[in-house]
Image (cartoon, rainbow, N blue to C red):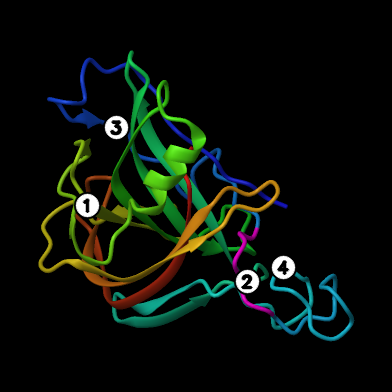
Amino acid sequence: MRTLRFSFGFLIISILFFGCKLDPPILPGDPGYVQSTPPGGGTTGTGTGTGTGTGTGTGTGTGTGTSSGYYIKGTLSGKTFDWEVDYTNWGTGNGKTSSVDQNGIETAELQGVISSYTSTDAVPAITIGFRTYQVDLGNQDQTSIATYFNGFVTIGAWNYATDNNLTAGTKYVVIYYNDTKGNTYSSIGTQSGTATISSVTQVPASPGVVESLNIKLSFSCTLYNLDGSGSTVTLTNTQASINLPDGL
């Protein structure tokens, strides 16, 4: 069972009038990245391993044919790909880059990941970040934060973020790609068009697992190498169904 939770925290003066600028997130291939356990809400597979019963196993069984309902597919720099999450070849991850000010206000980008489950570095991988999540850790209880989270991602067109600043009240998406050669790419830069979120389904919490969202979206974008070399890759006609856990 593998879990992932990460965040960067530092003091900022105010997030009501100033955006906060964060360091890049820990992504697949980076030191400290660990894949997550299978989230709740998956579909039933046909495994005969550790699933319930000897015929039809649950989506978390180790038999063949398990299915989570999560995937990402499209064209990556001219080559088609189809990563279907089965927790054998492809798995999910999640993360958060955030800051907390002196008043306990947390501002964050929440991220859902689909990555290789056979690689020790969890690459290749594609991460989708959603901005801007903001909660009052000092005055909101877990129930109110969960209610806010469940309405955080909305159906419709989302613009791509153009910089590393998080600003309260804005909604942006960021796409990251980690290849097997150690390169990290990001959609932060010049883009045309928007990402389209077609559905958002709440996945209730279960013992040991926080509530999450099953988000389906489509997008096409250019990704820029974070090493500053100017090299790019393209994602075209991409469709994804990802799991985004509550950032609490």
Between the C-alphas of marks 2 and 4, the distance is: 13 Å
Between the C-alphas of marks 3 and 1, the distance is: 15 Å
Which of the 4 image quadrants contains residue 196? bottom left
Which numbered disc flags the more N-terminal residue, 2 or 4? 4
Give whichever of 43, 96 is nearer the camera: 43
Span of residues in magenta: 38-44
Mark 4 vs mark 3, foreground winner is 4
**Counting other residues with Cα less than 10 Å from the Cα at mark 4, is it few (<14), some (14-19), or many (20 or more)?**
many
Residue at (15, 53) in percent of width and height: 189
**Counting other residues with Cα less than 10 Å from the Cα at mark 2, is it few (<14), some (14-19), or many (20 or more)?**
few
Which of the 4 image quadrants contains residue 233? bottom left
Q: Is 179 situated left or right of 155 in this image? A: right
Which numbered disc flags the more N-terminal residue, 1 or 2? 2
Residue at (53, 54) in percent of width and height: 93
Which numbered disc flags the more N-terminal residue, 3 or 2? 3
Magenta segment: does it hold 175?
A: no
Which of the 4 image quadrants contains residue 224? bottom left
Q: Are marks 1 and 2 in contact (CB under 8 Å)?
A: no
Between the C-alphas of marks 3 and 2, the distance is: 32 Å
Residue at (20, 19) in percent of width and height: 14
Q: Is residue 124 visible?
A: no
Return the x and y of residue 53 as percentages of the image width and height. Answer: 88, 78
Identify the secondary structure beneath mark 1: strand
Relative vertical location of residue 242 with respect to residue 174 in this rendering, above or below: below
Which numbered disc flags the more N-terminal residue, 4 or 1? 4
**Residue that label 2 marks:** 89
Q: Are marks 3 and 2 in contact (CB under 8 Å)?
A: no
Q: Amino acid at mark 3?
A: Leu
Q: Amino acid at mark 4?
A: Thr
Residue 172, disc? 1
